[in-house]
Image: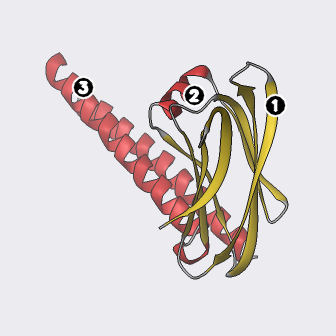
Amino acid sequence: MAFDRLVGMTGRLRTALVVLTLFVCFWSVSSLAEVPTAELAKKTEQLKQDIVDLNRELLKLEEDVLYPLDTQLVVFLGVDENAPFTLESVELLVDKKFATSYLYSDREIQALKRGGVQRLHVGNLTTGGHSVQAVFNGRGADNKFFRSTAKASFSKQSGAKYLELRVEPRPGQPLQPTFRIEELR
């Protein structure tokens, strides 16, 4: 019931932002009717920036309402640049329940291999013991498709919990990947 009210509230906030944006646009257009073109372009760009800033604040507020810090679980994904594995997709289960999946484009894979980190999942968890399982799908060093699973158990305390899924070369076996799940501090 409380969750439905929170979701309804974010919907009302989004509606309010749209109404406010339309009001500002109509007000700006009517007040700028006699303004020179260069100044009009400058004011239009400022209006666009104001809308972007309002949207950013709304998204932050929505995340704070839906995922309070005390119950938050955030899962990141990183790929080592030397990993002998080309990631195609990943599936994430939290407490044996589907949480998310993601299919990667070539550009996203290259960004991950250059040191990028993806925020794969944000969700809510109660305090206590939990498990996470990640299924990695892709191609190995021999260009053959395979799936590999990494599992971890962890304890959730109050405050946010951060986990990272890692794809790295296996120590001593550079042509074999290793898949890890580690807690971030």
Whole-percent x and y of residue 66?
A: 60, 65
List the residue tagged with mark 2.
109
> Which is nearer the N-term, disc 2 or disc 1?
2
Q: Residue at x 18, y 17 (%)?
A: 37
Note whether 1 is above or below 140 in the view shown.
below
Residue 181 appearing in the image? yes
List the residue tagged with mark 1.
146
Whole-percent x and y of residue 102?
A: 70, 38
Secondary structure of the residue carrying tag 2 is helix
Residue lying at the far right in this picture: please name it: 96
Residue 75 located left or right of residue 22: right
Asked if the residue at tag 3 contacts the one at tag 2, i.e. Cβ–Cβ closer than 8 Å, the answer is no
Note whether 19 is above or below 33 in the view shown.
below
Residue 34 appearing in the image? no
Residue toward you, 17 or 120: 120
Secondary structure of the residue carrying tag 1 is strand
Amino acid carrying mark 1 in the image? Phe
| Picture disc at residue 176 | none
Whole-percent x and y of residue 94?
A: 76, 61
List the residue tagged with mark 3.
33
Answer few, some or many: residues within 10 Å of disc 2's Cα (few below 14, many 20 plus, some between 14 and 19): some
Q: Residue at x 52, y 73 (%)?
A: 69
Give the distance between the C-alpha atoms of the residues marked 3 and 1, in whole angstroms. Answer: 62 Å
Answer few, some or many: residues within 10 Å of disc 3's Cα (few below 14, many 20 plus, some between 14 and 19): few
Note whether 2 is above or below 134 in the view shown.
below
Amino acid carrying mark 2 in the image? Ile
Question: Quadrant of the rendered structure where residue 86 is?
Answer: top right
Q: Residue at x 81, y 31 (%)?
A: 146
